[in-house]
Amino acid sequence: MNGRNKLYGLLAIVLSALVFFGGAVYGTYNPVSFPSAITLDNIAANNISVHITGAVANDGVFELPAASRLEDILQMAGVLDNADLSDINLSQFLEDGKKIEIPFTESDAAKDNKTNKFININTASHEELDSLPGIGKVKADSIINYRENNGPFKKPADIMKVSGIGEATYEKLKDMICVD
């Protein structure tokens, strides 16, 4: 009977192993479909659209995941060198449908501009033009070349006749410029 006990013992071990592994396999199989499964519709529903303007390289509307922060959209839009982020909470969560305006730093010429009120685009130096929001060295050159080739601007909005200066740029600087 000694051989029979060994056989029963071996059979008990094999059956125990089958039950154990069968239970493990059954426990990992889950035929239930969860409504929170990720689908393209759910992904789109969990995105937000945020409008960003001001001292960014690419202003406009950006689509981001719902849990995005201000820092995320700034990375997408690109921050200009003359952006003033000192009073902005980069860790704030973004909200769908909101508009965010990133302020420009105040250059020395812009500080002077507060005293003098306006920069005359017909007589302004390269440095004065470069200090205006949305105008860099290249656009300052273009403004000077335009007025040298076409004569003085008749009204501030005429600055939009300069290649590379559109309505968005004009909106940023219209309260800072004049013509005489």
Image: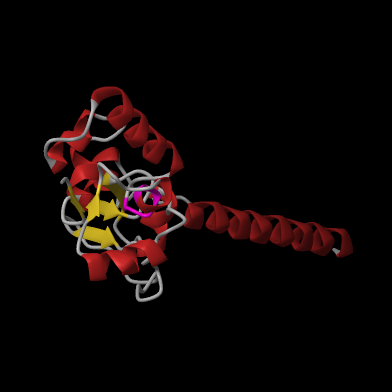
Q: Which span of residues is magenta-colored? A: 129-133
Question: Considering depth in this image, is 135 or 123 the residue closer to the camera?
Answer: 123
Could you tell me residue 177's position as x and y percent? 20, 51
Residue at position x 63%, y 54% from top? 18
Residue at image position (70%, 61%) is: 12
Q: Determine if residue 83 is in view.
A: yes
Could you tell me which quadrant the N terminus lies in?
bottom right
> Left or right: where does residue 127 sit relative to residue 15?
left
Count of marks, rendered view: 0
How far across and down, in percent of the image, does residue 156 sit?
Answer: 15, 43
Q: Is residue 8 left or right of residue 81?
A: right
**Horizontal and vertical percent position of residue 73:** 36, 54
For residue 98, above or below residue 78: below
Q: Quadrant of residue 143?
A: top left
Q: Main secondary structure of the magenta part?
A: loop
- Tell me which colouring the rendered structure shows: secondary structure
Residue at horizontal 36 percent and vertical 53 percent from the top: 128
Vertical side of 28 occupied by 57: above or below: above
Q: Residue furthest top?
A: 149
**Quadrant of the rendered structure where residue 41 is?**
top left
Magenta stretch encompasses residue 41:
no
Taking the spot 18% from the left edge, 59% from the top edge, the residue there is 98
The location of residue 142, given as percent across then percent down, is 37, 32
131 falls in the magenta region: yes
